[in-house]
Image (cartoon, rainbow, N blue to C red):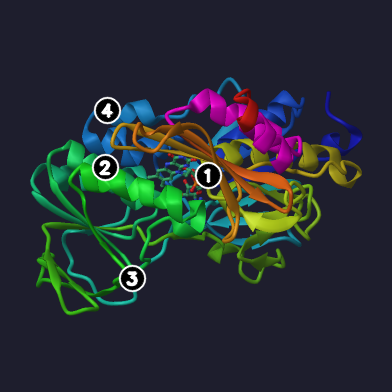
Amino acid sequence: MPSDSASALARIAIVGGSLAGVRAAEALRAEGYEGALTLIGAEPHAPYDRPPLSKQVLRGDWDTARTRLRFDPSALAVELRLGSAATALDVRAREVLLASGERVGYDGLVIATGCAPRKLPFALPRLGVHDLRTLDDAIALRELLVRAPRVCVIGAGFIGLEVASSCRALGLSCTVVEPLAVPLEPKIGARMAQLVCTLHRDAGVQLRTGVGVAAIEGDARVERVRLLDGSAIDADVVVVGIGVAPSVRWLEGSGVELGDGVECDASCATNVPNVVAAGDIARWPNGWLDQRMRVEHWTHAVEQAAHAAKRLLRGPAFREAFATVPYFWSDQHGVKIQFAGHYAPGDELLLVEGNEAERKLVALYGRAGRVSGVLALGKPARLMHYRKRIAEGMRWDEALQERERGST
Ligand code: FAD
């Protein structure tokens, strides 16, 4: 049943018609909220899932309809306002302003506008250069890949590497350019990052590491990528995967505290009463690590949306902190790579199961006497086991002892 605080919220608006927004709507109803609920989204499509975009959709294995999130707006009495971005927030009037000129009033607000791709800082040919964030991006890219034998991916983050994997599955030539000497090293450490590089090299991906991009050349259509060392990579399609930035422009000047995203307290509340945030956009003090962070992963968006919904309904009396062990997965060349926790340079690494040659393993990361992270290749159940134990505060000496005994 709704609390007293919830019954004061006759109208709740959620801005961001995707994962965190949809899960927040479901959580609000599950918590007993019976008032008006409006979901505002910039994209015209029914809410869909992003992970398949760089995988099944790009490879052509899935029809785009399969990416749709399981979500029934009429059963949940959610009014959808899709295809019109929020352009501003008036916290005094309690209104969201839309690009269409409409204003949507609210008593409670969930901010879930996620992130958008970072752009290269130079002019690009008009044709053949793509980001990958939205369903429309994936459809456009897929159409190009059918006719493009040579692909260059700029940026060896998880999305760039998944694109490379999908390109190889399609039999395309693929080069990945990355300024870091070892891609992913800041996320999972040198040894495991080298292993991921080996997966790619063995699958025929050309990795050009330790060098940045100077320009993308071509008149109307892309022809080549010029690197800072003067060399060039001929390409029919270029995919830019150089990271994302929080979609906060519509909140500028609103009074909602912004930094690297929307700044929240431990309970996911912003500095403005009755306004919470969740998903890729929210930066909050994660009690698990005692550190402010923003997490750009699927499971996080789901978990934080549920917490933010509770906080909105129950008001400031709800003091429960949102503490979580961040988790993501990535599928590359037929291998499921999963990581939970947090990596920092200097962390210890302990292989507790499997080995690199088999490409099936579990590795633990240790810091300050605790297990701080776990990476698994092809061992999903073990990954989840360790995620739970990390949340419970698993000690590093326990990990060492268990490996000695061979019983984890
Ligand atoms: P988003 O999904 O970005 O949704 C935000 C929504 O808000 C968007 O629909 C956007 O159009 C809308 N919006 C933005 N600005 C406005 C505005 N002003 N007004 C109205 N609406 C607005 N994570 C994993 O853990 N594993 C994976 O394998 C994985 N694969 C991925 C593959 C791809 C190609 C991408 C792009 C992401 C992947 N992720 C993966 C990350 C995961 O999808 C995100 O963490 C998740 O989508 C975050 O959900 P969100 O709702 O916070 O943000």
Judged by its main secondary structure, the magenta piece is helix
**Ligand 1 within 8 angstroms of badge 2 C-beta:** no
The residues bearing labels 3 and 4 have C-alpha atoms spaced at a distance of 30 Å
Q: What residue is shown with label 3?
A: 120
The numbered mark at residue 20 is none
The residues bearing labels 3 and 1 have C-alpha atoms spaced at a distance of 23 Å
Quarter in which the C terminus is drawn: top right
Q: Which amino acid does label 2 sit on?
A: Ser
Nearer the N terminus, badge 2 or badge 3?
A: 3
The numbered mark at residue 63 is 4
Label 4 neighbourhood size at 10 Å, few (<14), some (14-19), many (20+)?
few
Element under label 4?
loop
The numbered mark at residue 165 is 2
Q: What residue type is labelled 4?
A: Asp
Residues at circles 3 and 4 in contact by the CB criterion of under 8 Å: no
Q: What residue type is labelled 1?
A: His
Q: Quadrant of the rendered structure where residue 40 is?
A: top right
Residue 192 lies left or right of residue 295; in this view the side is: left
Q: Give the range drawn in magenta.
A: 377-402
Report the front residue among 338 and 194.
194
* Residue 9 lies in the magenta-colored region: no
Residues at circles 3 and 1 in contact by the CB criterion of under 8 Å: no
Which x, y percent locates residue 324? 69, 41
The numbered mark at residue 297 is 1
Q: What residue type is labelled 3?
A: Leu
Residue 331 lies left or right of residue 379; in this view the side is: left
